[in-house]
Each structure stands twice: as structure tokens, then as C-alpha cells.
């Protein structure tokens, strides 16, 4: 009977490093909570780039705004799909007219979200160009 081994990384390797090197690794890990010590060491051994997720307080607010806009756009997209589906499935001229009015209202909401995106992107461009 064969011993069970994980498929991705079947061999366990242990070693010792100096306290200074260990603290350097811990510093890298503290800047990217998504990275594990094992993954970091594998990347170092394989000469792979180590990308750290850096959060800037200034950019957090911008990213939050963009996330809110993205969720609004998704909702608008769902509404538009429902209206268009109803439009194509309806034979009544009056119903099609009312659905067309709903589409126009959604266009106004889209325009408002587009203006929000322009404002956020304008702020980002100013930061980018000033660096």
C-alpha cells in the first residue's frame, strides 16, 4: 500500500535560515497577506517574481467608489436585459411604448454612472500625471 502524497507538492523540505533572513521573509509576508511562507519560498527557489499587494490610503477611497459604480452598472445591465427581453416578447404597441420609456429612464441612470466614472478617472489621472 502506497503512502498518500498531495498532488501539487508531494515532497516536504525543511531547512534552517538565520534570524535576519527569517525577518526579511516575515516583512515580505506582512505586506501581502494572500501569500504564504511556503509559496514565497517556492517563488524564491524558482526565481519567480514576487508581487506584493500594496494598499494606498488615497487609492482605497477611489477603489471603493469604482466598486460601487461597478455594482450599479451590473444592476443597470440586469434591468436593461429584462426590459429588452420583455420588449421582444411583447406584441402590444402600448406595452412596447412603455418599455421604451423604461429604456430611456435607464439611459439617464447610465449617463449618471458614466459621469461618476469620469470624475473618478479624472482624479486618478491627476495623481498619475503628477508622479
Image: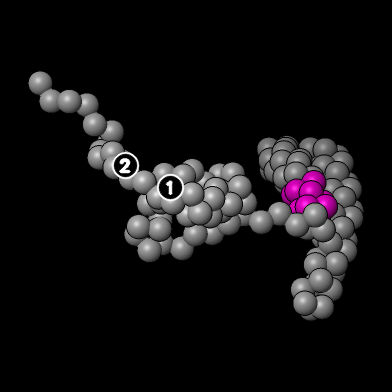
Q: Residue furthest top?
A: 1
Could you tell me residue 64's position as x and y percent? 79, 49
Tell me where the magenta segment starts and ends, as one range.
Answer: 60-70
Find out whether residue 61 is within the magenta segment: yes
The residue nearer to you, when weighing 14 against 63, is 14
Give the structural element (helix, strand or loop) at label 2: loop
Q: Main secondary structure of the magenta part?
A: helix
- Spot occupied by residue 94 in the image (x, y as percentages of width and height): 86, 40
- Tell me, yes or no, whether the highlighted magenta stretch contains residue 39: no
| Front-lying residue, 129 or 26 | 26
Residue at 17 percent across and 25 percent down: it is: 3
Residue placed at 38% from the left, 63% from the top? 47
Q: Residue at x 71, y 54 (%)?
A: 55
User: In this orientation, does residue 107 appear?
Assistant: no
Query: In the orientation shown, which residue stands out farthest toward the left?
Result: 1
**Residue at numbered disc 2:** 14
Which quarter of the rendered picture does the C terminus lie within?
bottom right
The answer to which of 28 and 46 lies nearer the viewer is: 28
Residue holding disc 1: 39
Which circle marks residue 12 in the picture?
none
| Label 1 neighbour load within 10 Å: few <14, some 14-19, many 20+ | few
Please determine whether, in this image, residue 81 is positioned above or below residue 43.
above
Write the residue at 47% across / 54% down: 21
Neighbourhood count class around disc 2 (C-alpha, 10 Å): few under 14, some 14–19, many 20 upward:
few
Picture quarter with the N terminus = top left
Find numbered disc 1 in the image and state the secondary structure of the residue it sits on.
helix
Q: Residue furthest front?
A: 19
- What's the image's color scheme? one colour
- What is the quadrant of residue 71 in the picture? top right
Amino acid at each position: 500500500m502506497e503512502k498518500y502524497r498531495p498532488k501539487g507538492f508531494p515532497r516536504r523540505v525543511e531547512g534552517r535560515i538565520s534570524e535576519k533572513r527569517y525577518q526579511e521573509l516575515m516583512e515580505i509576508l506582512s505586506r501581502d497577506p494572500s501569500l504564504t511562507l511556503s509559496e514565497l519560498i517556492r517563488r524564491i527557489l524558482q526565481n519567480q517574481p514576487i508581487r506584493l499587494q500594496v494598499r494606498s490610503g488615497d487609492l482605497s477611497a477611489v477603489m471603493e467608489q469604482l466598486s460601487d459604480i461597478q455594482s450599479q452598472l451590473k444592476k443597470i445591465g440586469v434591468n436593461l436585459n429584462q426590459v429588452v427581453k420583455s420588449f421582444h416578447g411583447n406584441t402590444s404597441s402600448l406595452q412596447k411604448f412603455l418599455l421604451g420609456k423604461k429604456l430611456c429612464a435607464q439611459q439617464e441612470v447610465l449617463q449618471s454612472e458614466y459621469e461618476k466614472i469620469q470624475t473618478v478617472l479624472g482624479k486618478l489621472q491627476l495623481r498619475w500625471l503628477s508622479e
